[in-house]
Image (cartoon, rainbow, N blue to C red):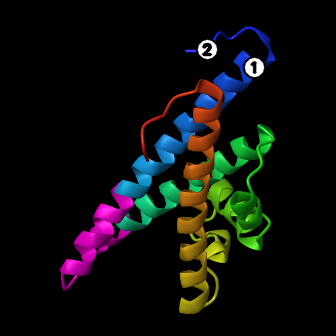
Amino acid sequence: MASSKGADGEQVLELLALHGYFLNASFLRDVFMRRVRRAQSSEAIDPVTFMDDQISMSLWYATLYVVIEGWRQAKLADPDVDALLADNHADRLRRFRNQVFHYQREYDNPRLLDFLGEDDADAKAATDWVRRTHAALGTAIERAVEERLGHTVPRF
């Protein structure tokens, strides 16, 4: 591992920290995707299972925004990532993350639904944006770490 002394060492440690946050988001994505695949194979989903599905999705989306914050704070650049983060979904995801990780007095706060939009087409667009953003961040972070360390990192 790189020395933590000097700007290069600090940049490597910052990238590795960002990579760790990305691994957290990837883990939660995988949990959610396993749940979705299960849900698609069954006919009826009970309310508790439905709530668990919503929790796993919310945690994935919220932790993905933590990666976006780290990306911006590290002042990284990638044309694919930067184009996705310029979309209005990024700010809506920030508000979604705040709702997930900051206590709210209201049980049913509309900010949770704001990210997904008003109809199925909006929800599909938000979901597609999350998936593309997750993949683009993973590729760009992996590339940045490999460039700085000079060797490959685990695949996401």
- The residue tagged 2 is 2
- The boundaries of the magenta stretch are 31-51
Q: Which mark is residue 129?
A: none
Q: Which residue is mark 1?
A: 8
Q: Position of residue 21 (x, y in %)?
A: 56, 39
Camera-nearest residue between 68 and 55: 68
Residue name at image x 59 percent, y 25 percent: 149
Q: Is residue 107 visible?
A: no
Q: Nearer the viewer, residue 75 or 31?
A: 75
Q: Inspect this view and state whether residue 117 appears.
A: yes
Helix, strand or loop at label 2? It is loop
Main SS of the magenta segment? helix
Q: N-terminal of the two: label 1 or label 2? A: 2
Label 2 crowd bin: few (<14), some (14–19), many (20+), radius 10 Å: few
Residue visible at 78% across and 46% down? Answer: 72
Is the Cβ of the residue at disc 1 closer than 8 Å to that at disc 2? yes
Residue 74 in picture, x, y percent from top left: 77, 37
Which quarter of the figure has residue 1?
A: top right
Badge count: 2
Above or below, comparing residue 38 to residue 140 in the picture: below
Residue 67, placed above or below residue 58: above
Q: Is residue 32 magenta?
A: yes
The answer to which image quadrant residue 108 occupies is bottom right
Front residue (pair 106, 41):
41
Give the residue type at disc 1. Asp
